[in-house]
Amino acid sequence: MKKIFIASDHAGYSLKKSIISKFSKLQKIIDLGAYSKESVDYPDYAKKLSKKVAINKDSFGILICGSGMGMSMAANKTKNIRAALCYSIKNTKLSRLHNNANIITLGERLIDKNKAFNLIKIFLSTKFEGGRHLRRIKKI
């Protein structure tokens, strides 16, 4: 079972709690904060989680903020991180199949929790295709 690190800012806190509740029975989930709805800066949590995923090669990350975009931008500043903002089944599958994404970012203000649960299941179960895609990832 792969380690899954999860973090959010204040805008993603409620969805983060729901994800932990839903998936902690199936996966080892390590909560890196935030621990309340009190205003915090999302780059701090994206950096903290990204560093954990980068050093734990077989792990995944879940980052949640209001839109998912800020977390994605901040996480992708870390070497060997490929954070994908996921909002549909197709873009979630492709983020894993073609880009070997190791962090999924979600926007609590843009998708409901059941859709988030489904996207996480897809993200965790989809395998990287490799081949020509590996060559491209090495250029990132």
Image: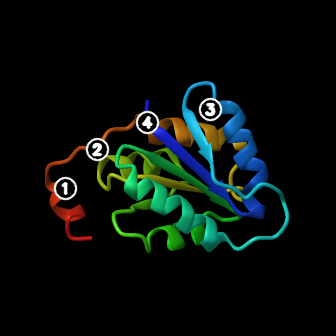
Left or right of 66 in this view: 71: left
**Distance between the alpha carbons at the discs numbered 4 and 3:** 13 Å
Cβ atoms at labels 3 and 1 below 8 Å apart = no
| Residue on which disc 3 sits | 23
**Disc 3: CA contacts within 10 A as few (<14), some (14-19) or many (>=20):** some
Residue where numbered disc 4 is placed: 2
Mark number displayed over residue 79: none
Q: Earlier in the sequence, mark 4 or mark 1?
A: 4
Residue 14 location in percent, x, y?
Answer: 79, 50
User: Which image quadrant for residue 139?
Assistant: bottom left
Outermost residue on the top side: it is: 25
Circle 1 is placed at which residue position? 134
Q: Earlier in the sequence, mark 3 or mark 1?
A: 3
Compared with 43, 103 (above or below) is above
CA gap between label 3 and label 1 equals 29 Å
The kind of secondary structure element at disc 4 is loop
Q: Nearer the viewer, residue 138 or 78?
A: 78
Mark found first going from the N terminus, 2 or 3: 3
Marks 4 and 2 sit apart, C-alpha to C-alpha, by 15 Å
Amino acid type indicated by mark 2? Phe
Label annotation for residue 128: 2
Q: 129 and 48: which one is in front?
A: 48
